[in-house]
Image (spheres, grey):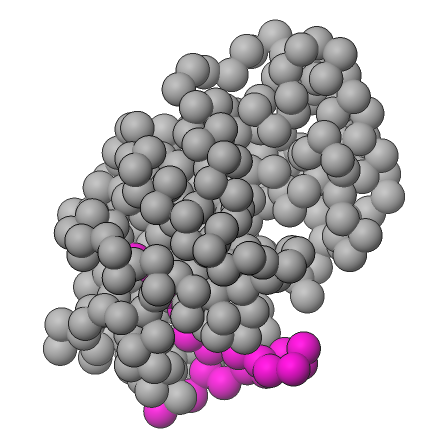
Amino acid sequence: MEYRELGRTGLKISALGFGASSLGGVFHSLKEADGIAAVHAAIDGGINFIDVSPYYGYLKAETVLGKALREIPRSAYILSTKVGRYGADGVNSWDYSAARVTRSVYESMERLGVDYIDIINVHDIEFANPWQVAQETLPALVELRNKGVVGHVGITDLQLENLRWMVEHVPAGTVESVLNFCHYCLCDDRLTEFLDFFESRGIGVINASPLSMGLLSSRGAPAWHPAPKALMDACHEAAQYCAAAGCPIEKLAMQYSVGEPRIASNLFSSTSPDNVRKNIEYISEPADPELVARVHGIIGRAFRLTWHNT
């Protein structure tokens, strides 16, 4: 496993990271024992970066992850969670106030069974008043950083412009990492346009969902996927081509995303220990550049088509 510097945080995180959203049953039903075993398989395979949120499964993901972490030494992993986005009974809710996000950090620590969090993120900033995040949410997290409750502060969003705007409107050093999803994968590389900006400010970059939330998979995108039909059709054709070429599109997609050295880590999520081990094995070799070029040709004009967050 390769380990990369996360901006100027001093953290060295695995190029492949474990996203714990699936532990909340976000994508399909979950057998808790399988989810716990998947976390253990990730750690055993050299993954040291784990990302979660109280929003995933409406607290369930953090609760299940906490059970898995009880059997793992605290020094073996770097833990990231989030504040601001919550929900219950299938209903989204957001609260980016200083009081709520501060309380949220301590609640997450209790569910996770830890006494500090390595990285705390403001979750999906596009749903917040940006000035509230800049002037209230982030200062509250910086205060926790100053107290040693959290190690570092980050922000997450689907829209890259929102991440850049926030960095430009807060004091230098406030934001230490950004987490973006579905913008560095086989069907969309727009994140590359922003890497110089983040790098110039010493901000580490984390990429989530190398499979673009299932678009780049042999079984195809789930019914709820918000991607436009043109992109879905193109990715389906690309998956069929990869299968005929003897390389599952999942393998190529994982290799492609991990192949960008300026991205510190690439998060995937699974409750299958076998799938975790398979993904770790996938990235042990680089992507075939000719096959990547063919896939990009198939996706063609649908490349970089995107959607709004939900």
Residue 22 shows in this picture? yes
Residue 99: x percent and y percent? 35, 91
Residue found 60% across the figure and 82% down from its top = 88
Residue at horizontal 37%, vertical 41%? 42
In this view, the residue in front, 62 or 301, is 62
Residue at 22% x, 41% y is 12
Q: Give the range drawn in magenta.
A: 79-99
Give the quadrant of the C terminus: bottom right
Q: Quadrant of residue 266?
A: top left
In-front residue for pair 19/28? 28
Image quadrant in which the N terminus is located: top left
92 on left or right of 148:
right
Image coordinates for residue 221, horizontal then vertical, percent: 75, 43
Q: Tell me, yes or no, whether the highlighted magenta stretch contains residue 82.
A: yes
Question: Does residue 114 show up magenta in the picture?
Answer: no
Q: In this picture, is 21 found above or below 261?
A: below
Q: In the visual, does 29 lie left or right of 160?
A: right
Rendered position, 126 above or below 290: below
